[in-house]
Image (cartoon, rainbow, N blue to C red):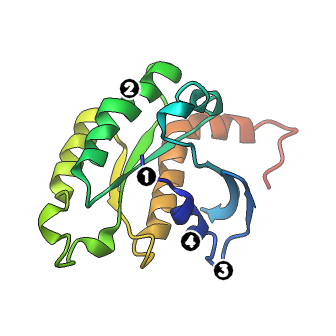
Amino acid sequence: MPSLKTIYQLFSTSKFLHFKINKTSYTAHVVYNEVNITLGLWDTAGTEEYDNQRPLSYPGTHIFVMVYDITNAQSLQNIEKKWVKEIKEFTNDGQIPWILVGNKLDLRDSADFKDRCVKFSDAEKLGKRLGAKRVIETSAKTQKNLALVFDEAVQVVVEAFEPKIVKKSNSKNCKQQ
């Protein structure tokens, strides 16, 4: 899976966010429906040498953002062949929601890449078949749809966990930040 490092770093440049970088993890503070939310973002290594260690970061995860390179069809195929299988194996049979993100949208109309770009409709079909909650294309270079990726990720988490969040917020000793 292509690294999310660039996407996370660019998202951190937003004047509305405060980011702290600590190796491969990032923290973003966002406001969603007038509630402050802290996002913990982890960029996990996709190489085989980390196959045994990567799942150690999965407990407590509320959403996965799976990224593929729209100029590389193999990277989209890896979502099914590697990433969805791994998530299902290590997260209670895949009960954690995920979104599918195609990066390098800026290259879709490039003469050098135009003919080999993955069609968005193909990514949508794959995402739907595999259970992605959203399918989005973005460009880390131009930042097109970059904020949308994180807005949608927060929305998916709220949709998936809202009953638990509402129940906790109704307790007498619970404070909202």
Q: Amino acid at mark 1?
A: Pro
Q: Amino acid at mark 2?
A: Lys
Give the SS element for disc 2. Answer: helix
Contact between labelled residues 3 and 1, with CB atoms less than 8 Å apart: no
Mark whose residue sits in front, 1 or 3: 1
Identity of the residue furthest to the right in this view:
173
Mark 3 vs mark 4, CA separation in Å: 11 Å
> Can the viewer see residue 173 in this picture?
yes
* Residue that mark 3 sits on: 15
Disc number at residue 2? 1
Mark 1 vs mark 3, CA separation in Å: 26 Å
Q: Residues within 10 Å of mark 3 (few under 14, many from 20)?
A: few
Counting residues from the N terminus, which is met first, the one under dot 2 or under dot 1? 1
Q: Amino acid at mark 4?
A: Leu
Q: Is residue 110 left or right of residue 18?
A: left
* Residue that mark 4 sits on: 10
- Above or below, 121 against 163 in this view is below
Counting residues from the N terminus, which is met first, the one under dot 3 or under dot 4? 4
Toward the viewer: 20 or 72? Answer: 72
Contact between labelled residues 1 and 2, with CB atoms less than 8 Å apart: no
Q: Can you give x and y, in whole percent of width and height, for residue 73 in the image? A: 22, 50
